[in-house]
Image: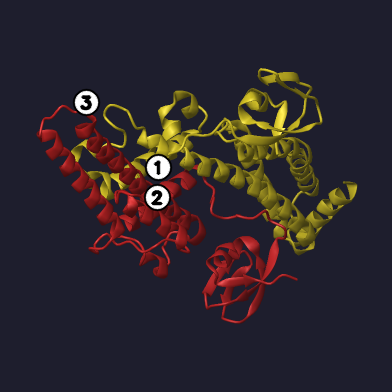
Chain colours: A red, B yellow
């Protein structure tokens, strides 16, 4: 789909970027060629044009004068919608991170976020943790229905010593252990342990 | 059951040897009491609640809108789980009870999973429809207090996030989510409202008879049938429990 008018193309590009990327496209809000900034720029430009057209004080019921205004307005709204959808989608995925990875953003993902988004993450973490404290349950645990009390796990990277119901266990790389699922579930989700399926 | 009871008493017998000046009859009675409690919450009362919660969870997963919070159910089950956990912890201190305590622990974990999954499913739905929920009194009433606080804070967080990154940098007339003259309802585009028209698959539990979806389109719903249907016509039946979503 090519549009005759250039308006809104950058907004569309932003959303396509989301679709293309594995997790989220990088966005730091500071680069000049940054998509969000470009869309905001277009909104500003459209607004200025609209103002100057209005200042000409012609009869806007004349299609010749009214039409451009309609186009500017519709393009602005489209841009606005694309931009908000983009940021909202990012925010939602950033929130999901709290469920998968716990209270800290993995370093390789953090690089793709801007400062405000990192703030969003910790604010979301706060809200969710407060809720969990109120109901006195860890909702991020037990993501799968429990099948066995114990799971056999292989250690993929050193985790040091962890506390289990049956005492402390040292999880050194390349060793296997038979442990209570609830003790190591979070480590499996973070990818530090691998469940050995028999 | 008798075997388990014998076992319990036997386990107690082992402990008695270490502690000679305990009144044997008293210990026996204590244990009977404990066991009675165990049975009451382990076998009968809990199972009904567990089934109800399982039903509530499936309904919640199937329904496009947020349903009423099963406050009492969750409260009772959580109390039962806590109580049971104490009994299991007690059992675990004795090696000869290991096998039984593991089985109880497994069952406990399953119930606990149900509770967690129920609350989690609701929370994710609340996030999806946070703005819709806090705007409508009727929806707010369906939330627990903690959920309501969560919904409010979550909606505020998302709104302020979008304001910070985008809206505040736009020309003044566009800084609000919605148009001043309400021509465009941007907030419902960005924060979708539940779609009551979506299809659900449900199991009819009680005979409902014919319901009219629209003119000339009548569906009869009889107990035991599995029906794929739009959500809104059966909304009230789900609430009453005569239809279960699957």
Residue A167 - label: none
Q: Toward the viewer: A118 or A11?
A: A11
Q: Residue furthest right?
A: B2
Q: Earlier in the sequence, mark 2 or mark 3?
A: 3
Badge 1: residue crowd in 10 Å (few <14, some 14–19, many ≥20): many
Q: Is residue B15 above or below residue B113?
A: below
Q: Share a chain, discs 2 and 3?
A: yes
Quadrant containing the C terminus of chain A in the rendered view:
bottom right
Badge 2: residue crowd in 10 Å (few <14, some 14–19, many ≥20): many
Pinpoint the chain carrying mark 3.
A
Tell me the residue that label 3 is attached to. Answer: A61
Q: Quadrant of residue B40?
A: top right
Pinpoint the chain carrying mark 1.
B
Tell me where residue B87 appears, x and y as whole percent: 70, 49
Q: Quadrant of residue A64?
A: top left
Q: Is residue B194 above or below residue A87?
A: above
Residue at disc 2, secondary structure = helix
Tell me the residue that label 1 is attached to. Answer: B154
- Relative placement, left or right, of B43 versus A150 is right
């Amino acid at each position: 789909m090519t549009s005759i008018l250039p308006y809104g193309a950058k907004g569309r590009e932003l959303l396509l970027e989301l679709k293309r990327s594995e997790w989220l496209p990088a966005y730091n809000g500071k680069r000049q060629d940054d998509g969000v900034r470009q869309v905001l720029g277009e909104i500003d430009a459209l607004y200025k044009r609209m103002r100057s057209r209005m200042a000409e004080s012609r009869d806007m019921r004349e299609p010749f004068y009214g039409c451009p205004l309609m186009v500017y307005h519709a393009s602005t709204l489209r841009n606005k919608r694309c931009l908000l959808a983009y940021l909202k989608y990012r925010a939602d995925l950033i929130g999901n991170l709290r469920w998968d990875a716990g209270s800290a953003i993995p370093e390789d993902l953090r690089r793709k976020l801007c400062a405000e988004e990192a703030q969003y993450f910790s604010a979301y973490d706060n809200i969710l943790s407060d809720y969990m404290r109120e109901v006195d349950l860890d909702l991020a645990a037990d993501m799968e229905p429990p099948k066995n009390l114990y799971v056999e796990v292989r250690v993929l990277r050193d985790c040091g010593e962890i506390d289990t119901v049956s005492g402390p266990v040292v999880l050194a790389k390349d060793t296997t252990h038979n442990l209570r699922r609830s003790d190591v579930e979070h480590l499996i989700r973070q990818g530090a342990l691998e469940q050995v399926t028999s | 059951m008798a075997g388990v009871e014998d076992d319990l008493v036997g386990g107690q017998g082992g402990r008695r040897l270490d502690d000679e000046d305990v009144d044997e009859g008293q210990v026996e009675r204590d244990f009977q009491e404990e066991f009675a409690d165990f049975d009451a919450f382990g076998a009968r009362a809990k199972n009904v609640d567990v089934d109800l919660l399982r039903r509530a969870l499936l309904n919640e997963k199937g329904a496009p809108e947020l349903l009423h919070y099963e406050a009492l159910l969750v409260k009772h089950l959580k109390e039962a789980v806590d109580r049971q956990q104490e009994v299991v912890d007690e059992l675990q201190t004795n090696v000869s009870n290991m096998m039984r305590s593991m089985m109880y622990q497994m069952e406990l974990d399953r119930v606990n999973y149900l509770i967690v999954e129920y609350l989690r499913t609701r929370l994710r739905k609340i996030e999806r429809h946070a703005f819709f929920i806090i705007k409508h009194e009727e929806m707010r009433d369906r939330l627990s207090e903690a959920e309501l606080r969560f919904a409010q804070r979550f909606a505020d967080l998302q709104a302020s996030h979008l304001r910070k990154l985008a809206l505040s940098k736009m020309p003044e007339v566009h800084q609000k989510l919605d148009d001043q003259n309400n021509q465009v309802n941007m907030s419902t585009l960005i924060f979708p409202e539940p779609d009551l028209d979506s299809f659900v698959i449900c199991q009819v539990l009680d005979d409902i008879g014919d319901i009219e979806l629209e003119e000339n389109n009548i569906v009869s719903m009889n107990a035991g049938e599995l029906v794929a249907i739009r959500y809104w016509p059966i909304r009230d039946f789900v609430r009453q429990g005569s239809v279960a979503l699957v």
